[in-house]
Amino acid sequence: MLNETHAHHLRSWVASANDGVTDFPVQNLPYGVFRRRGSDEPWRVGVAIGTMILDVDSAHRHGVLDGGAARAATTCASPSLNGLMSLGPTAWTALRRAVSELLRDDTVTGAAARALEPALLVAQHDAELRLPADVGDYTDFYASVYHATNVGAMFRPDNPLLPNYKWVPIGYHGRASSLVVSGTPIVRPIGQVGSEGGAPPVFAPTRRFDYEAELGAFVGAGNSLGSPIPIDAATHQLFGIALLNDWSARDIQAWEYQPLGPFLAKNFATTLSPWVVTFEALAPFRVPAFVRPAGDPAPLPYLFDAADQAHGGLDITIEVWLRTARMHATGDAPVRLSSGNARDMYWTVAQLLAHHASNGCNLQPGDLLGSGTISGADRGSRGCLLELAWRGSEPVRLPNGEDRRFLEDGDEVILRGHCAREGFVRIGFGDCSGEVRGAAVGSF
Ligand code: MN
């Protein structure tokens, strides 16, 4: 799985990629869709490198890509990554290898590309980014056993984890139309909220507005209707990962979720980070699948693959940062609320994908699989406020004295993710942010 593109010693002729702190060194090479801010240029596929973006289509037109990489690059003059995603891993690897050579400071191609720099690079601060893919279908899972146990304990103290959890990956069909890119303001939703003691429900802005720190995995070529994806083929169907914030209205959710699951409590907005870190870039950070405690069942055969058990986990740190309106006004930097890790997922991403297709359901390029809130065993790793403030009973105290049980208007929530391992260069995901705006109360 590892190849020359992962080597620690690689450096880029784009100086900002070599500073040791950027999310986007030459070992990462995530894809996004961009254009110059305020222009009417066509949206097109780019690769983040340091503080810059490589215009892949321009590189192709200037003749610095060839062979399989050039063929793959023909999908990059496009306002989405769906075309590239549909090509499959051989093409992805060819393009990654070529882009790596093109951006390195010690290759012939790199020297040729550097001479073309004004035509190939756009500064990220001069660019706007849109959603990286046209997402046809979005499914959100529930893959953290710690999150499932914590939330279950709030509602069923004697029986926090339902008996199906350790057998079947739990998920629901989300809403693709309301996916938004990082930076999009999020309006506090209005909805029907149950009342105590049998009183009628009220229709009002949510008072329990929350975030969920998740990963979103993008599907590659996919499968045709009626043709499941075997677990040992699932990794070839996974293109890459972005950060995902599954905004949630807990009071609306509590009233509406039985018996069919989440609906309007979650489908008003879901934020994605603009850069998709490929599974190939993540190869150095693969770890064994979650070690199940003694007594837990083994995965059923259709979800069990020895290679997936050995390498199917992901060592990705996922942090949640908060900047309140007051902090913004006083110039305070965001504060970190939590830090979790995707290796605590009970199911691997390959298992989620194989399970999703196991009944013949067809997955398509650009389909999105949310991990579910990623929480770990300790309090500091809880990936949503519902858990962190324990349903409002343990408010989170911020350094400036403010308390949070749930989100207030003007709160900006920022998800950040990174991977680090001895002997490899740290890579990151960029920010996934959204600021809460007041409800449109005149509208009801
Ligand atoms: Mn979720």
Image: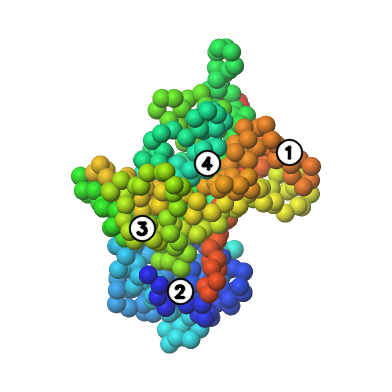
Q: Which residue is mark 3?
A: 308
Q: Which residue is mark 4?
A: 147
As shown in the figure, which amino acid type bears the numbered disc 3? Asp
> Which one is earlier in the sequence, the residue at label 4 or at label 3?
4
Q: Nearest the camera: 164 or 358?
A: 164
Marks 4/3: CA distance? 23 Å
| Nearer to us: label 4 or label 1 | 4
As shown in the figure, which amino acid type bears the numbered disc 2? His
Q: Residue 76 location in percent, x, y?
A: 37, 64
Q: Secondary structure at mark 4?
A: helix
Q: Which numbered disc covers residue 403?
A: 1
Marks 1/3: CA distance? 42 Å
Q: Secondary structure at mark 2?
A: helix
Q: Which numbered disc covers residue 120?
A: none
Q: Quadrant of the C terminus?
A: top right
User: Within 10 angstroms of label 4, few (less than 14), some, or many (20 or more) residues?
Assistant: many
Would residue 414 be seen by someone viewing this image from the given angle?
Answer: no
Q: Relative to 429, is 258 above or below?
A: above
As shown in the figure, which amino acid type bears the numbered disc 4? His
Marks 2/3: CA distance? 21 Å
